[in-house]
């Protein structure tokens, strides 16, 4: 979507959710800045919002995955 990202991740228990999300946001922001701005300077730049929303998925995993795949059709 143009203003947000939905991900369905399986994170092993040995990794914390916050560290995993921070890693994904950090690495993707660096790549987006390098590809979009064509610069290696990263200090003072920001891309992602500070927060995130995390929830556990159980029996409704297929419904959530379908929603993520088809979210552009629902808007």
Image (cartoon, rainbow, N blue to C red):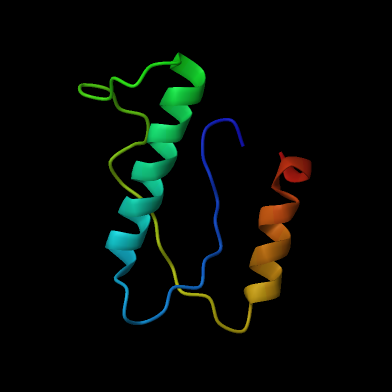
Q: Is residue 69 above or below residue 35?
A: below
**Residue 62, image x, y percentages:** 70, 73
Q: Is residue 68 found left or right of 44 in the rendered image? A: right
Q: Is residue 49 found left or right of 38 in the rendered image? A: left
Q: Which residue is drawn at 43% across and 68% down?
A: 55
Q: Which residue is drawn at 29% across and 61% down?
A: 18
- Work out whether residue 32 or residue 39 is closer to the camera in this orientation and state it: 39
**Residue 36, image x, y percentages:** 50, 19
| Total numbered badges shown on the rendered structure | 0
Q: Residue pushed farthest left?
A: 44
Q: Is residue 3 above or below residue 64?
A: above
Q: Which residue is drawn at 21% across and 24% down?
A: 43
**Residue 39, image x, y percentages:** 38, 16
Where residue 30 sits, quadrant-wise, is top left
Q: Where the N terminus falls, by quadrant?
A: top right
Where residue 50 sits, quadrant-wise, is top left
Q: Where the C terminus falls, by quadrant?
A: top right
**Residue 69, image x, y percentages:** 72, 54
Q: Residue pushed farthest front?
A: 40
Q: Residue pushed farthest right?
A: 73
Q: Residue at x 27, y 25 (%)?
A: 42
């Amino acid at each position: 979507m143009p203003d947000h990202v939905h991900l369905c991740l399986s994170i092993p228990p040995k990794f914390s959710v916050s560290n995993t999300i921070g890693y994904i946001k950090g690495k993707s922001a660096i790549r987006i800045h390098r590809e979009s701005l064509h610069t290696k300077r990263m200090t003072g730049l920001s891309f992602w919002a500070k927060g995130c929303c995390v929830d556990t998925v159980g029996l409704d995993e297929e419904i959530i995955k379908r929603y993520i795949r088809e979210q552009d059709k629902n808007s």
